[in-house]
Amino acid sequence: MIRLIVQRLLALVPLLFIVSVLTFSFTSLLPSDPVDLIVGDTATQEQYEIVRERLGMNQPIVVRYVQWLGRAVQGDLGTSFFNSVSVTGAVMQRLPVTLSLTAVSALIAIVVGVAAGMAAALRPRSWIDRFATLGATFGQAIPNFWFGLILVAVFAVNLRWFPATGFTALSASPWDWLRSVILPSIALGTSSSAAIARQVRSAMVGVLQQDYIRAARAQGLSARRVLIKHALTNAMVPVVAVLSFQITVLLGGALVVEQVFAINGLGTLAIGAVRQQDIPMIQGIVLVMVALVVVVQLATDIVYGLLNPKARPS
């Protein structure tokens, strides 16, 4: 297992390098000039050149990339063009908000998806199976931002069970934190739970028909032990890949759901940076998001190796 982790970590180095090159290249080749947005229409050419030199925009793109990469390796993602704040500081300040939303959404998706998939697999072609299939289809069809608006209208505006907007830090109040993330997490995790339920049902139906499951039952093992230790453990091997993909989907979807619930996470920061064409901020957010996806993929490889010893390097 240690060898697997080392191999995956070594493979991440060229991946992050390629991503950094693409991110810097694409943001630096935007058609409009951010200097024009900073100096305005009334600025003189001399003022324009001064600002352009101060931001380093007058240097070749290769030189700018090397300088940016050197600082990024040290944890410095640059400074915002518009408010002179540290990109690293701004991203790290908003990151816990997005991670909280993603983590709770993933927990909801896993619990609901695995439970619904198992219930449907244990009684194929029953009303439970049909209901779970219908719910999964509905869950994958509805947009998460629309579902979020419905949740706000029902549970925040009418019933007043949860706050409609805003985010409370976990350190400030665990109860208020949970109340602030539960509605956006449900809106975000519904689609992923539907995808997980479909995969769990398909995998469980196949596993329950295997000979070793019949042998375990013939040995007199309890139904719970057969289901959890033998059936679910083996069925989770193909499900892990789906979980990994869905967690990355949740990270991207969180940026949209944050707008619905007025949560100041990375989504709000990213949209503001795009509108202002704040290149350093865009580059920093993209790089951090890619790093999060890479961490998720690494965790997936480790879990997959634990569940399936054949996947481990010899």
Image (cartoon, rainbow, N blue to C red):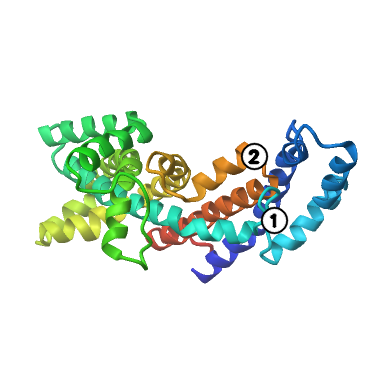
Q: Nearer the viewer, residue 216 or 97?
A: 97
Given residues 272 and 230, the one toward you in this image is 272
Residue tagged 1: 79
Could you say which quadrant of the image residue 275 lies in? top right
- Nearer-the-camera pick, 160 or 183: 160
Q: Horizontal and vertical percent for residue 97?
A: 43, 55
Q: Is residue 106 left or right of residue 56?
A: left
Q: In the figure, residue 88 lies in which quadrant?
A: bottom right
Question: Where is 85 relative to 25, above or below?
Answer: below
Q: Residue at x 15, y 44 (%)?
A: 122
Left or right: 60 as drawn, with respect to 142: right
For residue 149, side relative to residue 131 (left or right): right
Asked whether the viewer can see residue 72, the reply is yes
**Amino acid carrying mark 2 in the image:** Gln
Image position, residue 91 (x, y; %) = 56, 56
Mark 2, Cα crowd under 10 Å, few <14 / some 14-19 / many 20+, is some
Q: Residue furthest right?
A: 46
- Number of callouts in the render? 2
Mark 1–mark 2 Cα distance, whole angstroms, equals 14 Å
Q: Looking at the image, tell me whether mark 1 or mark 2 is earlier in sequence order.
A: 1
Residue lying at the far bottom of the rendered structure: 2
Disc 1 residue crowd, few under 14, some 14–19, many 20+, Cα 10 Å: many
Amino acid found under the numbered disc labelled 1: Thr
Q: Secondary structure at mark 2?
A: helix
Is 21 left, or right, of 307 in this rendering? right
Res 276 label: 2
